[in-house]
Image (tube, rainbow, N blue to C red):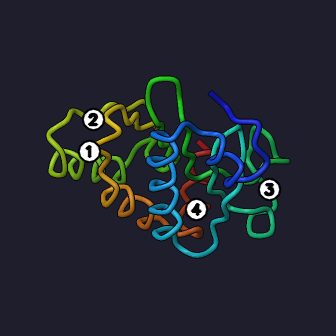
């Protein structure tokens, strides 16, 4: 369920109360935890945390007019999604799976880089903050460029 909102605050205001509370807390967690250099905006109808063109002029390979995506938060029909591009594979994914198992008894519901948060009363915010802080802008650019060259 993409949003037509122009800004993150407009997006939050458009959400139902229960979703607004969860998405706001996720947003605050990510904003507090992200290393310097990432920028918040609306992109693809979601809250987006990106490497801006000023820092990475090439932009996203499939649409260079877009900044390099890193994390997105979306309110879907039946859950809230956290997309973290660094979770496609490798050590960060291994760490996250292990940390999830230690943090919560619930099974991790995840796609390639999408963590589906269905139990909105039991979101592991601290773990999501740790995930957000683990990758600097420079490291994300390096990882991204290596994956695009494959």
Task: Examine the image and state in which quarter residue 61 appears.
Answer: top right
Q: Earlier in the sequence, mark 3 or mark 2?
A: 3
Q: Earlier in the sequence, mark 1 or mark 4?
A: 1
Give the secondary structure at mark 3. loop
Q: Residue 137 in the image: x percent, y percent?
A: 59, 68
Task: Decide which of 55, 108 is in the foreground and name it.
Answer: 108
Q: Earlier in the sequence, mark 2 or mark 1?
A: 1
Q: Residue at x 31, y 61 (%)?
A: 126
* Label 1, residues with CA under 10 Å away: few <14, some 14-19, many ≥20: some
Circle 3/circle 4 CB separation < 8 Å: no
Tell whether 146 sits left or right of 114.
Answer: right
Circle 2/circle 1 CB separation < 8 Å: yes
Tell me the mark number nearer the camera, choosing from 3 and 2.
2
Q: Which residue is drawn at 46% across and 49% down?
A: 21
Q: Residue at x 44, y 62 (%)?
A: 29
Q: Which of marks 4 and 2 is nearer the N terminus?
A: 2
Q: Mark 2 points at which residue?
A: 108
Task: Decide which of 11, 82 is in the foreground and name it.
Answer: 11
Tell me the mark number nearer the camera, choosing from 2 and 1.
2
Tell whether 109 sits left or right of 8.
Answer: left
Q: Distance between the residues labelled 2 and 1?
A: 8 Å
Q: Distance between the residues labelled 4 and 2?
A: 27 Å
Task: Examine the image and state in which quarter residue 57 appears.
Answer: bottom right
Tell me the mark number nearer the camera, choosing from 1 and 4.
1
Q: Name the residue under label 4.
A: 142
User: Considering the image in quadrants, where does the C terminus appear?
Assistant: top right
* Label 4, residues with CA under 10 Å away: few <14, some 14-19, many ≥20: few
Q: Distance between the residues labelled 3 and 2?
A: 34 Å
Q: Name the residue under label 3.
A: 58
Tell whether 107 sits left or right of 32.
Answer: left
């Amino acid at each position: 369920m993409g949003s037509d909102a122009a800004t993150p605050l407009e997006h939050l205001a458009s959400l139902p109360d229960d979703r607004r509370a969860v998405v706001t807390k996720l947003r605050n967690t990510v904003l507090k935890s992200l290393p310097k250099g990432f920028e918040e905006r609306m992109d693809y109808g979601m809250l987006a945390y990106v490497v801006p063109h000023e820092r990475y002029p090439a932009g996203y390979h499939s649409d260079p007019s877009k900044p390099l995506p890193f994390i997105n938060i979306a309110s879907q029909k039946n859950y809230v999604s956290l997309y973290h591009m660094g979770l496609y594979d490798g050590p960060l994914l291994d760490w996250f799976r292990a940390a999830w198992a230690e943090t919560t008894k619930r099974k991790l519901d995840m796609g390639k880089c999408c963590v589906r948060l269905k139990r909105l009363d039991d979101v592991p915010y601290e773990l999501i903050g740790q995930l957000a802080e683990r990758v600097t802008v420079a490291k994300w650019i390096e990882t991204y460029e290596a994956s695009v060259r494959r």
